[in-house]
Image (spheres, rainbow, N blue to C red):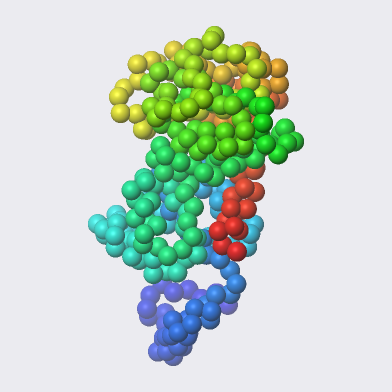
Amino acid sequence: MDVKILSIDDLNDGDVGRLFFRARSFATDLRNLNKGSVIVMTAFFEPSTRTKLSFATASLRLGFDILNFDPESSSLKKQESFEDTLRTLASLGIDLLITRTSRALEEQFIRTLPCSFINAGDGINEHPTQALLDCFTLLQAWRCDDFCGKKILIIGDVAHSRVARSNLKLMRRLGAEVAILAPSTFLLSEASEKLLSYERFKDLPNNFDAVMVLRIQKERLEDPLLFSDIEYFRAFGMSKKRLDSLGPQCLILHPGPINISIEIDEDAAYGPNSLIKAQVQNGVYVRAALMEYCCC
Ligand code: NCD
Protein backbone atom coordinates (compact mmCIF):
# COMPACT_ATOMS: atom_id res chain seq x y z
CA MET A 1 0.00 0.00 0.00
CA ASP A 2 1.34 3.41 -0.90
CA VAL A 3 1.53 5.91 1.97
CA LYS A 4 1.15 9.56 1.11
CA ILE A 5 2.26 12.14 3.66
CA LEU A 6 1.18 15.55 2.53
CA SER A 7 0.29 16.92 5.98
CA ILE A 8 1.01 16.11 9.61
CA ASP A 9 -2.69 15.32 9.64
CA ASP A 10 -1.93 12.25 7.55
CA LEU A 11 -0.30 10.67 10.64
CA ASN A 12 -2.44 9.72 13.65
CA ASP A 13 -1.10 9.62 17.24
CA GLY A 14 -0.27 5.92 17.00
CA ASP A 15 1.69 6.49 13.80
CA VAL A 16 3.64 9.33 15.40
CA GLY A 17 4.53 7.17 18.42
CA ARG A 18 5.75 4.33 16.22
CA LEU A 19 7.80 6.67 14.08
CA PHE A 20 9.48 8.20 17.10
CA PHE A 21 10.29 4.74 18.41
CA ARG A 22 12.05 3.82 15.17
CA ALA A 23 13.85 7.14 14.97
CA ARG A 24 15.11 6.63 18.53
CA SER A 25 16.47 3.20 17.68
CA PHE A 26 18.32 4.70 14.69
CA ALA A 27 19.70 7.49 16.87
CA THR A 28 20.90 4.96 19.48
CA ASP A 29 22.73 2.81 16.98
CA LEU A 30 23.25 3.75 13.37
CA ARG A 31 23.54 0.07 12.43
CA ASN A 32 19.79 -0.12 12.89
CA LEU A 33 19.52 2.22 9.95
CA ASN A 34 22.34 0.95 7.82
CA LYS A 35 21.03 -1.77 5.57
CA GLY A 36 24.47 -2.32 4.08
CA SER A 37 23.99 0.42 1.55
CA VAL A 38 26.20 3.43 0.90
CA ILE A 39 24.63 6.86 0.63
CA VAL A 40 26.19 9.18 -1.91
CA MET A 41 25.36 12.86 -2.28
CA THR A 42 26.12 15.01 -5.29
CA ALA A 43 26.26 18.78 -4.82
CA PHE A 44 26.90 20.60 -8.10
CA PHE A 45 27.07 24.39 -8.11
CA GLU A 46 27.92 24.49 -11.83
CA PRO A 47 26.15 22.91 -14.81
CA SER A 48 27.02 19.34 -15.73
CA THR A 49 25.62 16.58 -17.89
CA ARG A 50 28.27 13.86 -18.27
CA THR A 51 30.02 14.07 -14.93
CA LYS A 52 26.92 14.28 -12.79
CA LEU A 53 24.99 11.59 -14.66
CA SER A 54 27.93 9.22 -14.83
CA PHE A 55 28.48 9.50 -11.07
CA ALA A 56 24.77 8.79 -10.65
CA THR A 57 24.85 5.83 -13.05
CA ALA A 58 27.97 4.42 -11.40
CA SER A 59 26.32 4.80 -8.02
CA LEU A 60 23.24 2.88 -9.09
CA ARG A 61 25.34 0.16 -10.71
CA LEU A 62 27.28 -0.25 -7.46
CA GLY A 63 24.02 -0.61 -5.54
CA PHE A 64 24.74 2.67 -3.73
CA ASP A 65 21.94 5.09 -3.01
CA ILE A 66 22.36 8.56 -4.41
CA LEU A 67 20.97 11.91 -3.32
CA ASN A 68 21.35 15.18 -5.14
CA PHE A 69 21.70 18.47 -3.31
CA ASP A 70 20.54 21.07 -5.80
CA PRO A 71 21.63 24.56 -4.66
CA GLU A 72 19.04 26.21 -6.91
CA SER A 73 16.11 24.53 -5.19
CA SER A 74 17.64 24.43 -1.69
CA SER A 75 17.07 26.68 1.32
CA LEU A 76 20.05 28.73 0.16
CA LYS A 77 17.36 30.40 -1.93
CA LYS A 78 15.56 31.25 1.34
CA GLN A 79 18.62 33.14 2.56
CA GLU A 80 19.91 30.26 4.67
CA SER A 81 23.64 30.73 5.13
CA PHE A 82 26.04 28.36 3.42
CA GLU A 83 27.40 27.40 6.87
CA ASP A 84 23.93 26.39 8.08
CA THR A 85 23.34 24.44 4.90
CA LEU A 86 26.59 22.57 5.49
CA ARG A 87 25.63 21.84 9.11
CA THR A 88 22.36 20.40 7.83
CA LEU A 89 24.07 18.23 5.22
CA ALA A 90 26.60 17.07 7.82
CA SER A 91 23.78 15.89 10.09
CA LEU A 92 22.34 13.53 7.49
CA GLY A 93 25.10 10.95 7.83
CA ILE A 94 25.98 10.42 4.18
CA ASP A 95 28.96 8.23 3.26
CA LEU A 96 30.33 9.96 0.16
CA LEU A 97 30.06 13.53 -1.04
CA ILE A 98 30.76 14.56 -4.63
CA THR A 99 30.94 18.28 -5.34
CA ARG A 100 31.46 20.60 -8.27
CA THR A 101 32.15 24.02 -6.80
CA SER A 102 34.92 26.53 -6.08
CA ARG A 103 38.04 25.47 -4.19
CA ALA A 104 36.98 27.67 -1.24
CA LEU A 105 33.53 26.10 -0.89
CA GLU A 106 34.97 22.66 -1.48
CA GLU A 107 37.30 23.18 1.49
CA GLN A 108 34.35 24.20 3.64
CA PHE A 109 32.44 21.08 2.56
CA ILE A 110 35.38 18.86 3.45
CA ARG A 111 35.91 20.54 6.83
CA THR A 112 32.27 20.17 7.81
CA LEU A 113 31.08 16.85 6.38
CA PRO A 114 32.55 13.74 8.02
CA CYS A 115 32.52 11.46 4.99
CA SER A 116 34.49 10.43 1.91
CA PHE A 117 34.69 13.06 -0.79
CA ILE A 118 35.28 13.26 -4.56
CA ASN A 119 35.97 16.50 -6.41
CA ALA A 120 33.96 16.61 -9.63
CA GLY A 121 35.63 19.83 -10.77
CA ASP A 122 36.73 22.85 -8.69
CA GLY A 123 37.07 26.04 -10.70
CA ILE A 124 40.16 25.96 -12.89
CA ASN A 125 42.06 23.70 -10.50
CA GLU A 126 41.36 19.98 -10.82
CA HIS A 127 38.97 17.45 -12.29
CA PRO A 128 40.53 14.16 -11.16
CA THR A 129 37.88 11.76 -12.41
CA GLN A 130 38.00 13.31 -15.90
CA ALA A 131 41.75 12.71 -16.02
CA LEU A 132 41.25 9.14 -14.81
CA LEU A 133 38.65 8.41 -17.46
CA ASP A 134 40.63 10.12 -20.25
CA CYS A 135 43.80 8.20 -19.47
CA PHE A 136 41.84 4.97 -18.99
CA THR A 137 40.28 5.49 -22.42
CA LEU A 138 43.64 6.03 -24.11
CA LEU A 139 45.21 3.00 -22.42
CA GLN A 140 42.23 0.93 -23.52
CA ALA A 141 42.50 2.19 -27.12
CA TRP A 142 46.25 1.53 -27.27
CA ARG A 143 45.99 -1.73 -25.33
CA CYS A 144 48.88 -0.81 -23.07
CA ASP A 145 49.61 -0.18 -19.40
CA ASP A 146 51.42 3.12 -19.65
CA PHE A 147 52.07 6.03 -22.00
CA CYS A 148 55.83 5.51 -22.45
CA GLY A 149 56.84 6.77 -25.90
CA LYS A 150 53.43 8.41 -26.49
CA LYS A 151 53.02 12.03 -27.52
CA ILE A 152 49.81 13.80 -26.56
CA LEU A 153 48.73 17.29 -27.64
CA ILE A 154 46.21 19.41 -25.75
CA ILE A 155 44.61 22.17 -27.81
CA GLY A 156 42.61 25.11 -26.53
CA ASP A 157 41.82 26.98 -23.37
CA VAL A 158 44.33 25.25 -21.11
CA ALA A 159 44.62 28.31 -18.87
CA HIS A 160 41.05 27.94 -17.59
CA SER A 161 40.82 24.17 -17.78
CA ARG A 162 40.75 21.92 -14.73
CA VAL A 163 40.57 19.01 -17.19
CA ALA A 164 43.94 20.01 -18.66
CA ARG A 165 45.56 20.51 -15.24
CA SER A 166 44.56 17.08 -13.94
CA ASN A 167 45.32 15.40 -17.25
CA LEU A 168 48.75 17.00 -17.56
CA LYS A 169 49.73 15.48 -14.22
CA LEU A 170 48.33 12.01 -14.85
CA MET A 171 49.39 11.74 -18.49
CA ARG A 172 52.96 12.67 -17.60
CA ARG A 173 52.95 10.38 -14.57
CA LEU A 174 52.01 7.57 -16.96
CA GLY A 175 54.99 8.44 -19.17
CA ALA A 176 53.54 10.60 -21.97
CA GLU A 177 55.20 13.64 -23.47
CA VAL A 178 52.53 16.35 -23.45
CA ALA A 179 52.47 19.48 -25.60
CA ILE A 180 50.05 22.38 -25.74
CA LEU A 181 48.71 24.43 -28.63
CA ALA A 182 46.79 27.59 -27.72
CA PRO A 183 46.64 31.32 -28.28
CA SER A 184 49.02 33.03 -25.83
CA THR A 185 46.14 34.08 -23.53
CA PHE A 186 45.13 30.43 -23.09
CA LEU A 187 48.58 29.00 -22.35
CA LEU A 188 49.39 27.88 -18.82
CA SER A 189 50.60 30.72 -16.62
CA GLU A 190 52.26 28.39 -14.10
CA ALA A 191 55.73 27.31 -15.23
CA SER A 192 55.91 23.69 -16.21
CA GLU A 193 59.08 21.82 -17.01
CA LYS A 194 59.31 19.86 -20.25
CA LEU A 195 55.98 21.21 -21.45
CA LEU A 196 56.22 22.21 -25.08
CA SER A 197 53.91 25.09 -25.94
CA TYR A 198 52.93 26.15 -29.46
CA GLU A 199 50.88 29.10 -30.62
CA ARG A 200 50.45 28.20 -34.30
CA PHE A 201 49.15 25.03 -35.87
CA LYS A 202 51.78 25.08 -38.57
CA ASP A 203 54.63 24.90 -36.03
CA LEU A 204 53.42 21.55 -34.66
CA PRO A 205 55.33 18.32 -35.31
CA ASN A 206 53.45 15.50 -37.04
CA ASN A 207 54.05 12.63 -34.66
CA PHE A 208 51.27 12.90 -32.07
CA ASP A 209 49.50 9.76 -30.91
CA ALA A 210 46.53 11.59 -29.43
CA VAL A 211 45.04 15.06 -29.22
CA MET A 212 42.68 16.41 -26.60
CA VAL A 213 40.54 19.33 -27.73
CA LEU A 214 39.14 21.72 -25.12
CA ARG A 215 36.20 24.10 -25.11
CA ILE A 216 36.84 27.80 -24.47
CA GLN A 217 35.67 28.26 -20.86
CA LYS A 218 33.78 31.46 -21.66
CA GLU A 219 32.14 31.49 -18.22
CA ARG A 220 35.59 31.89 -16.60
CA LEU A 221 37.09 34.59 -18.82
CA GLU A 222 37.82 37.87 -17.11
CA ASP A 223 38.59 39.87 -20.24
CA PRO A 224 36.61 39.82 -23.49
CA LEU A 225 38.01 37.55 -26.20
CA LEU A 226 40.17 39.22 -28.82
CA PHE A 227 38.91 36.89 -31.56
CA SER A 228 35.57 35.72 -32.88
CA ASP A 229 34.41 32.09 -32.93
CA ILE A 230 35.11 31.98 -36.65
CA GLU A 231 38.64 33.35 -36.23
CA TYR A 232 39.31 30.88 -33.40
CA PHE A 233 38.15 27.94 -35.51
CA ARG A 234 40.30 29.10 -38.40
CA ALA A 235 43.41 29.24 -36.19
CA PHE A 236 42.88 26.40 -33.71
CA GLY A 237 39.76 24.44 -34.72
CA MET A 238 40.12 20.69 -35.19
CA SER A 239 39.07 19.28 -38.56
CA LYS A 240 39.65 15.88 -40.14
CA LYS A 241 42.43 17.37 -42.28
CA ARG A 242 44.20 18.87 -39.29
CA LEU A 243 43.78 15.65 -37.32
CA ASP A 244 45.46 13.72 -40.13
CA SER A 245 48.32 16.23 -40.14
CA LEU A 246 49.05 15.60 -36.42
CA GLY A 247 50.00 11.97 -36.84
CA PRO A 248 49.11 8.89 -38.89
CA GLN A 249 46.72 7.36 -36.34
CA CYS A 250 46.17 10.28 -34.04
CA LEU A 251 43.24 9.63 -31.70
CA ILE A 252 40.99 12.47 -30.58
CA LEU A 253 39.52 13.17 -27.15
CA HIS A 254 37.21 15.89 -25.90
CA PRO A 255 35.82 16.03 -22.35
CA GLY A 256 32.61 17.68 -23.56
CA PRO A 257 30.53 19.71 -23.78
CA ILE A 258 31.49 20.18 -27.43
CA ASN A 259 30.99 23.46 -29.25
CA ILE A 260 30.84 22.41 -32.90
CA SER A 261 32.42 24.88 -35.35
CA ILE A 262 34.31 26.67 -32.56
CA GLU A 263 36.97 24.24 -31.30
CA ILE A 264 36.11 21.22 -33.48
CA ASP A 265 34.01 20.23 -36.49
CA GLU A 266 31.63 17.27 -36.82
CA ASP A 267 33.93 15.15 -38.98
CA ALA A 268 36.67 15.26 -36.36
CA ALA A 269 34.33 14.85 -33.37
CA TYR A 270 32.37 11.89 -34.72
CA GLY A 271 34.91 10.32 -37.12
CA PRO A 272 36.68 6.95 -36.76
CA ASN A 273 39.56 8.33 -34.65
CA SER A 274 37.24 9.83 -32.08
CA LEU A 275 37.18 8.40 -28.54
CA ILE A 276 34.56 10.83 -27.31
CA LYS A 277 31.82 8.22 -26.93
CA ALA A 278 34.21 5.83 -25.20
CA GLN A 279 35.18 8.62 -22.79
CA VAL A 280 31.57 8.94 -21.64
CA GLN A 281 31.12 5.17 -21.33
CA ASN A 282 34.36 4.79 -19.42
CA GLY A 283 33.39 7.65 -17.15
CA VAL A 284 30.84 5.33 -15.54
CA TYR A 285 33.36 2.51 -14.98
CA VAL A 286 36.16 4.70 -13.72
CA ARG A 287 33.91 6.61 -11.38
CA ALA A 288 32.37 3.39 -10.09
CA ALA A 289 35.85 2.09 -9.31
CA LEU A 290 36.74 5.28 -7.47
CA MET A 291 33.50 5.36 -5.51
CA GLU A 292 34.03 1.75 -4.46
CA TYR A 293 37.56 2.64 -3.41
CA CYS A 294 36.27 5.52 -1.32
CA CYS A 295 33.49 3.58 0.36
CA CYS A 296 34.21 -0.15 0.60
C1 NCD B 1 34.62 19.72 -18.33
C2 NCD B 1 34.49 20.48 -17.04
O1 NCD B 1 33.40 20.68 -16.52
O2 NCD B 1 35.54 20.87 -16.55
N1 NCD B 1 33.49 18.94 -18.66
C3 NCD B 1 33.29 17.73 -18.08
O3 NCD B 1 33.43 17.55 -16.90
N2 NCD B 1 32.97 16.71 -18.90
C4 NCD B 1 35.07 20.56 -19.47
C5 NCD B 1 34.27 21.76 -19.89
O4 NCD B 1 33.29 22.15 -19.29
O5 NCD B 1 34.67 22.35 -20.90
Which of the image's four quarters has the C terminus?
A: bottom right
Question: Image check: 109 left or right of 263?
Answer: left
Residue farthest front in this picture: 193
Percent of width and height locating residue 148: 67, 31
Residue farthest right in this picture: 143
Q: Residue at x 50, y 38 (%)?
A: 166
Q: Quadrant of residue 114?
A: bottom left
Which of the pair 125/4 is nearer the observer?
125
How many numbered discs sit on the rendered protein? 0
Percent of width and height locating residue 135: 62, 37
Which of the image's four quarters has the N terminus?
A: bottom right
Percent of width and height locating residue 293: 59, 57
Which of the pair 246/35 is nearer the observer?
246
Task: Look at the picture and state if 60 lies above or below 212.
Answer: below
Task: Look at the picture and state if 206 lies above or below 6.
Answer: above
Residue 19 visible (yes or no): no
Q: Residue at x 41, y 23 (%)?
A: 186
Q: Residue at x 61, y 30 (%)?
A: 176
Which of the pair 261/241 is nearer the observer?
241
Percent of width and height locating residue 210: 63, 25
Task: Look at the picture and state if 129 lies above or below 5.
Answer: above
Q: Residue at x 38, y 21 (%)?
A: 185
Residue 141 visible (yes or no): yes
Question: Image check: 174 left or right of 219?
Answer: right
